[in-house]
Image: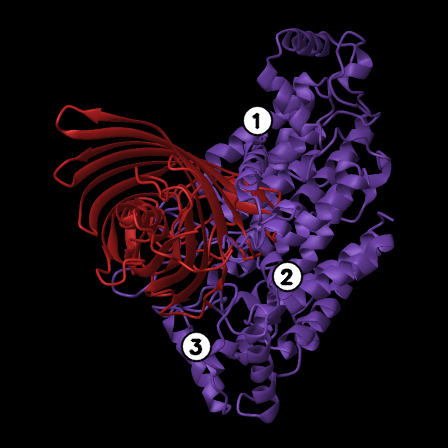
Chain colours: A red, B purple
Amino acid sequence: MDLRCVLSRDSRGTVHASARALVGGFVAVALTWAAPVAAQSMEDAIFMDRRVLCAGLLYTRDQWSNYWEGGLKRDNGNVGTVTTQAAAWMGAYGVTDKLNIIASLPYVWTNASQGVLGGQRGAQDLTVGVKYRAFRTPLTSAGSLSGIVGLSASAPTSDYTPDFLPLSIGSSSKRVTARGTLSYEGRNGVYVNGSAAYTRRGNVTLDRVAYYTQNQLFLTNEVAMPDVSEAALTVGYQRKGLVIPVVITRQTTLGGGDIRRQDMPFVSNRMNFTRVDTRVQYVLPKLRAVTVHAGVSQIIAGRNVGQGTTLMGGLLLVGKL
Amino acid sequence: MLTMIGLRDTFGFVVDRRSRAPRIAALLLLSIGATSCDKAITQTESLEPLIATSTDAAAGTWRPIVLTSTSQIAVAAPTAVTSDAYKAELAAIKSAQRVITPVQQERVAYWSGGGVLRWNQLLRGLVARYNLPPAPRADGTYPGPDVNNPFGDPAFPFANPPYAARAYSYVAVAQYEALKAAWYWKYQYNRPSPAKTDADVRQLVPISDLPSYPSEDAVLAGVTVAMLQALFPASVEEITRRGADQREAALLAGKATSSDLAAGLALGRSVAALVLARASTDGTSNAVGNATLWAALADSARAKGETPWLSLETPARPPMLPNFGFVQTWSMTSAELSAARPVAPFPTASAQMKAEVAEVRRTVDGLTTAQRAIAQKWNDGAGTYTPPGHWNDIAAEFIRDAKMSEVRAARAFALLNMSMHDASVACWDAKFRYFNPRPSQLDVNIRTDIGLPNFPAYPSGHSTFSSAAADVLGYLFPASAAEFKVMSDEAGISRLYGGIHYMNDITAGKSHGARVAAFTIRFAQSDRAQ
């Protein structure tokens, strides 16, 4: 298989729609320390047609100067502004019109503007998922309702350390996410998606033999990672090669301890956040194989995460194989 | 197109690009398998019920450290095992055993692993809990931990490495003193344990021929609770509960009657009072210093033509315990401390120092994954049980595997921690005499892979602690001496990998630690415990 992306004659609608399907996940790459990558990648209702491949690169740049130490919002002069950047490769492929495969692999690098702590860099976690449309029902004169289920798995592709937060590039935890999405698409271009996901996270191994969290000393290098749930609501508009979603996402970590006063974050902390993001995706009119993406997101509330603002941009190529 | 880089390493099979869908389904299933198994984690330092290879019947004659003699604190003679009072105590054990709850059984099993080992684990947890520096105020100054307001922000104490080294040593020495005293009285009175005097008292744990009056479990509870309450006052509730659990477990297990426990508790508390009296005048209360002292340290370095150490934290934080070098040691006189002090580091403007800085830069810029893992392994920074805690962690498994009696286990921890406390005092004495900058101060491009400690570089505290610990452990467990040396060397070099120490800090710290350990070993050789 090669990288040629030939514009499919009949796939124009699929082109930008599938691009939308991808972007959500990659906005999450760099948002907060250890935020599950690509957790959102399968949140929406759009499918690639059979034998259509969409692939490309997205760049994200997340910055925060304030973070929540437990419930306390603060800054920290020893890191200043923490910047996490990611260049993510991603692809989606239509096995059938109702079954898509989605994959992503980001390269992540971090930096602190103050203090002496060195930024980290490396290939992060490979995510591979399948997404299946279980039903699509036309509604009386109003549009259609569809239901989608998805299953994805992530695993680290390099031996980066999860024990240097907030500058670690990820949690190094293997993860499996199950997701269900209900999508309403109106005839006027407005669509609404509701999505819920549950992520099971495997234990993490540290380079040290003991650690302290949740008011307890653990005499082991193994860290139990609490599972994560997520709910997302999208209101969007799509018309003529243009897609503009606005998404509010709430991630809840189902366990884990708070960052202690003046401590570093720890990989199994209870990391919760509510995030709003919006994106614009546009199919170039004279080059229909190319979709341009730009987006911004903002954490508006959180616990044990940075209050990140993320900018995103990217290009995806679409073609029939 | 879907380049499956990494799949081979992660999942152990190679993805065939020609038929992706089934393979990806397999990947998903494998990942589910990898993450859906039980999340329970296994703590590595498990303790089986202690069956000591020897009761160490002569421990009452071993050399005391703080006490004037092992019989300094009188313990009244117990009632005879034939008395009605004693029989009533036996009846109370039997009725308690009949209604024992699952929670009580768990506690009996927990404490059967050995009181000294359990308290050492608990102490490491307390150190990790309190090893957090104060957060800065809005005006850029730092509040100090206040012993009179231990629950405040910051909490008291800040159990940093010197504080922790001292705490580990005081707890271990107090336990060792109390147990030697207990052994003295045990073999004065020779009262058997209840399970040995009454066949109807069940033995829920292995019970040796060690006389039970005063109870070693209650001695340990009494002495340790009193020490820990003083050192970690904000955890008084948990500490007190643990002590009560230990005493209850001894009774339920058939090891001790209520009078064995009462005598032990009183003895333990009395020993703690004597040890705490020493602690209250050992110089620690002056260790923090004040703004005048902090400025004088920098002025003194400048007067010698040296670049003084600067805090690289934002806002700048006062140095950690600059007067800790004046705290009383266990096995060295102040003259011996001075004689053991390392020579001065290279002048900050010298060519050797530039070469040292360049070496750190080169190391962090080219750091390998294995080197970073070593830096992380020995980081033992804020929020952890500190380097002395790490060496207690290492020692605990050797002490457990050697199946030492409680009093011999206490000796091992006492010697180890006396040595590390002395190493801490000696190292801080040198650090604040030389006031040498950290690598990142002399080259701002040196970015660290672990937190940068907020005190001068030379000599390396990790190296001093580790070398002192390894030598004492090598003395106690000669068959493993080489293993301890390897660990100590790795702990030392980890600081170069972390980007926070020059090589000269490490070599000076290692030899300094060895000189300190020699004093501890000299004491051990004459303590009559051989």
**How many numbered discs sit on the rendered protein?**
3
Label 3 sits on a secondary structure element that is: loop
* Near-viewer residue (A198 or B27): B27
Residue A111's image quarter? bottom left
Tell me the tag on residue A265. Answer: none
Q: Residues within 10 Å of mark 1 (few under 14, many from 20)?
A: some
Q: Earlier in the sequence, mark 1 or mark 2?
A: 1
Q: Earlier in the sequence, mark 3 or mark 1?
A: 1
Q: Residues within 10 Å of mark 3 (few under 14, many from 20)?
A: some
Residue highlighted by disc 2 = B374
Residue B148 in the figure: left or right of residue A291:
right
Residue B122's image quarter? top right
Place of residue A294 in the rendered image (x, y in percent of width and height, measured from the top left): 25, 58
Q: Chain of mark 3?
A: B
Q: From mark 2 to mark 3, how far is it between C-alphas?
A: 27 Å
Q: Chain of mark 1?
A: B
Q: Chain of mark 2?
A: B
Mark 3: amino acid: Leu
